[in-house]
Amino acid sequence: MVQHGLRCIAFCKTRKLCELVLCYTYPKGALGLLVNIKMDRRRIESDFFNGSICGIAATNALELGIDVGHIDATLHLGFPGSIASLWQQAGRSGRREKTSLAIYVAFEGPLDQYFMKFPHKLFRGPIECCHVDPNNEQVLQQHLLCAALEHPLSLLHDEKYFGPGLESAIMRLKSKGCLSTDLSRDAAARIWTYIGHEVYEGAVYMNQGKTYLVKHLDLSSKIAWCQQADVNYYTKTRDSTDIHAYPASITNDQFQRTSAQRHICKVTTTWFGFRRIWRRSNQVFDTVELSLPDYSYESQAFGFVPQSVKTAVESSQYCFHGGLHAAGHALLNVVPL
């Protein structure tokens, strides 16, 4: 599309997918956008608005609230998680009463394949309602990190937007090293958010179409040493997540007729290795062990597991926790429907 002069946005579900799109298309003249660094993002948005570049790869950060001028086409790489997001992304093109094109590229996941089999569920399905618990501090912390990247936070001015939990959430983020009043530490705080996902010794870190090998990671100073390297593969971590539910202390009269319970829980992610994957074929050609500190946070969980089911599974000598893990994956794909 770029080669034919069409102005387009490729919406990607993850930052890494943005980088891969840029790597695949850059030799052919396309340009990419990463929406994680404010200065780069504003510059590329400006170039796209004035027509200096025709194509950008973006996460859903360009889904709302930004006017980048007329767009001829949108490319949607994988289902974004909700029908509302898909239509919102598609609505970026075709403004100012001009014709446009939206292309949805389905991946191999069950949700993408479901919509390929039943396209009417996608095109005629209702727009979902958004349900967010503003009192969930983990949700609040994620919003605060995004807000702080755009503009320094202020207890005086921002409490009306984020609520009375703002101060405690900021203090917790500062204790984790994710927020700082020292601007010179911003880069280190930002690296901390990538540790375990993109930055670890042996990882291929991609930025603006260039690839770097992570040679050393100092967890105490939150600094990673990288060396630019022209490699034809990327890396992906192997991890497991454990959810420990504390005894139920949250009750609601509305649910007295069911054994379902809502718990405060501790979520812990453990990274135990990573894979090296060929960029062109997406085939794994090597696996490497990895040792990183666990990442934990508290959240809320909703559970419904009758004791009779657990007893029946274990008496048949099946793995109960493995079954729960599989059921969790199934639910994640069913919930958006």
Image: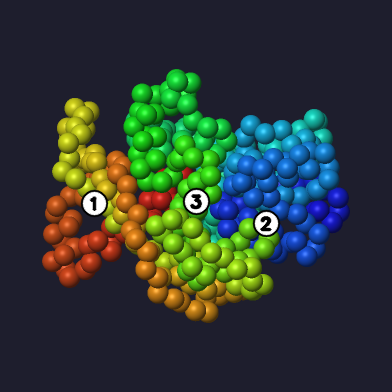
Q: Residue furthest bottom?
A: 285
State the mark number for residue 208: 2
Q: Nearer the viewer, residue 323 or 26?
A: 26
Give the vertical position of 2 relative to 303 (above or below).
below
Q: 221 or 244, which is in the foreground?
A: 221
Q: Nearer the viewer, mark 1 or mark 2?
A: 2
SS assignment at label 2: loop
Q: Amino acid at mark 2?
A: Gln
Is the residue marked by circle 2 packed among few (<14), some (14-19), or many (20+) residues within 10 Å?
some
Q: Position of residue 166 (x, y in %)?
A: 39, 29
Mark 1 residue element: strand
Residue occupying the far right of the picture: 4
What is the total number of numbered labels drawn onto the structure image? 3
Q: Is residue 163 left or right of residue 282?
A: left
Q: Residues within 10 Å of mark 1 (few under 14, many from 20)?
A: some
Vertical placement of residue 123 versus 67, above or below: below
Q: Quadrant of residue 107?
A: bottom right
Q: Is residue 226 visible?
A: yes
Residue at (45%, 20%) from the top-left corner? 156
Quarter of the image containing the N terminus? bottom right
Q: Quadrant of residue 60?
A: top right
Q: Label 3 amino acid?
A: Ala
Which badge, 1 or 3, comes first in the chain's sequence? Answer: 3
Colour scheme of the picture: rainbow
**Residue 151: x and y, percent?**
56, 32
What is the CA distance from the residue labelled 2 to the residue labelled 3?
19 Å
Q: Is residue 84 left or right of residue 221?
A: right
Residue, disc 1: 244
Report the front residue among 323 and 49: 49
Residue 308 picture location, percent across and down: 14, 54
Which mark is on residue 222? Answer: none
Residue plotted at (35% across, 43% down): 175
